[in-house]
Image (cartoon, rainbow, N blue to C red):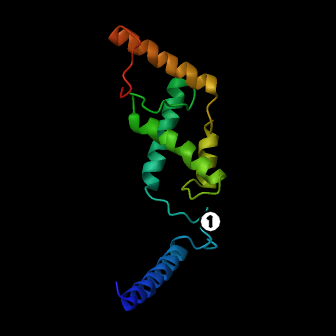
Amino acid sequence: IESTTVSALKSASAGAGASRATSRSRVFPHSDMDNKPAQASYPRQNEGLWNERLEQLKQYKVDHGDCNVPKEWSGNKQLGRWVCKQRIKYRYLQQGKESSMTKERISKLEGIGFEWSLPSSLEWDRRFNELKLYKADYGGCSVAKEW
């Protein structure tokens, strides 16, 4: 590559970087541009869907006594995955990473008794119960990795 081409690429690349930085400052207006996330300004999408899942979680709590929906719960896999994602987003927020978790969402979840981390014994019990169900359905405990 000719040196003039390299110079042109470098200046075009620098211009694109500036454009990305400007774009980022519009999306994350409170960011100090050192790749630190702007907690409150992270764009929230699907607020209606989030509230719908919250209502489903409230019903799950009425039916089961807690908010600990298994990730692959057959009754509503989307709800189980959503609950798992809320814990991840909360952890990201605590670590200073970009997250769509807000104080308002935290308050709503905590208001219904949501637990941000599960005790390992609870997870063990849950997995053991899943194994018992598997054994009842398939006659053994040799579970395929993909299952």
Helix, strand or loop under label 1: loop
| Rendered residue at 54%/56% (across/down) | 100
Observer-nearest residue: 57 or 3?
3
| Rendered residue at 51%/80% (across/down) | 22
Q: Amino acid at mark 1?
A: Lys
Observer-nearest residue: 110 or 85?
85
| Rendered residue at 48%/79% (across/down) | 17
The quadrant in which residue 4 appears is: bottom left
- 67 to the left or right of 80: right
Identify whether 95 is placed above or below 27.
above
- 95 to the left or right of 139: right
Identify whether 135 is placed above or below 2.
above
Residue 12 x %, y %: 41, 85
Q: Which residue is mark 1?
A: 36
Observer-nearest residue: 109 or 97?
97
Residue 128 x %, y %: 51, 17
Residue 78 x %, y %: 40, 39
| Rendered residue at 51%/39% (across/down) | 84
Dot 1 crowding, Cα within 10 Å, few <14, some 14–19, many 20+: few
Observer-nearest residue: 34 or 44?
34
The quadrant in which residue 16 appears is: bottom left
The quadrant in which residue 52 appears is: top left
